[in-house]
Amino acid sequence: MFHNASYHTMNKYFSLSVFAIAMITSAYARSEGDVPSPPAGVERPQYKITATQKGKQLGSIIIELFPDVAPKHVANFDSLVSIGFYNGTAFHRVIPGFMIQGGDPNSKTKPREQWGFGDPSQKRIPAEFSKIAHRRGIVSAARAADPNSATSQFFICVADAPWLDGQYTVFGRVLEGMEVADKIVDVERDQRDNPIDKIEMTIVKLSGKERLPTKK
């Protein structure tokens, strides 16, 4: 049997060792889901999403997309931005502690009951799953039950959502403006998580000096 002093000393070191292993394991698990740096020569496109409610600007969110991770989703988003597709669409689903979702063409002029269902004529984008985790600030593609049913709708995580990892296509992240996303997710909403007062968006692509330094 150990002497009390020796036992406590060993117990102390054992506890510290367990704590250190736990910290290392946690850090490793987190690094597993980190956004990788872009390959040499790849410039990730950036876009500014400006949100407006009742004629008042709520602010802007700057996002960066990952053509090196989800090229088909990024190309689809970019093509839609280039024709002004998103302008006038709404953030039609906002859930505190989870995400804000928008980009449905139905939300421009059709009844609220149809918001979120999309247009069946829209081009479908096949899944491009990756190891990037759904953490706060991640931009991911909304879809129906079919993994290959993504169209124009997207969501921004306002909190970590690990249950979505490997199930939804991550194709970007927020570089600036998460406080605006937080403002959007906290607005008054109905039983369908639709903001009572419509929140419209406009999206433009940034270039040259408009671009922000990319995250490391």
Image (tube, grey):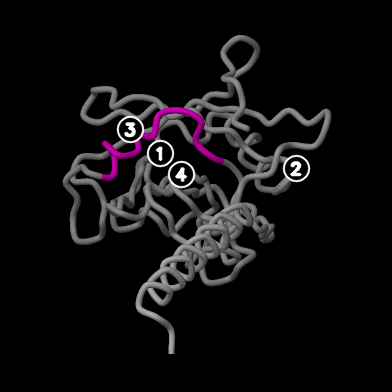
Point out the image quarter for the N terminus. bottom left
- Whether pointer 3 and pointer 4 mark residues with C-beta atoms closer than 8 Å, the reply is no
Mark earlier in primary sequence (1, 2)? 2
- Judging by the rendered image, the residue that carries numbered circle 4 is 103
Q: Which residue is drawn at 43% across and 74% down?
A: 6
Callout 2: SS: loop
Q: Distance of mark 3 from mark 4, alpha carbons?
A: 20 Å
| Outermost top residue | 209
Instruction: Say which element carries label 4.
Output: loop
Query: What secondary structure is marked by label 3?
Result: helix
Q: In this view, does 28 lie to the left or right of 96?
A: right
Q: Image point 26% across, 39% down: which residue?
A: 198
> In the depicted view, which residue is nearer to us: 156 or 204?
156
Q: Which residue: 60% across, 55% down? A: 33
Whether label 2 touches label 3, CB < 8 Å: no
Do the residues under discs 2 and 4 have CB atoms within 8 angstroms? Answer: no
Residue under label 1: 89
Which of the 4 image quarters holds residue 147?
bottom right
Q: Which amino acid is tagged 2?
A: Asp
**For residue 68, which numbered disc appears in the image?**
2
Which image quarter: residue 89? top left
| Residues shaded magenta | 173-185
Give coordinates of residue 139: x percent, y percent: 52, 45
| Residue 192 colored in magenta in the image | no
Mark 2–mark 4 Cα distance, whole angstroms, equals 23 Å
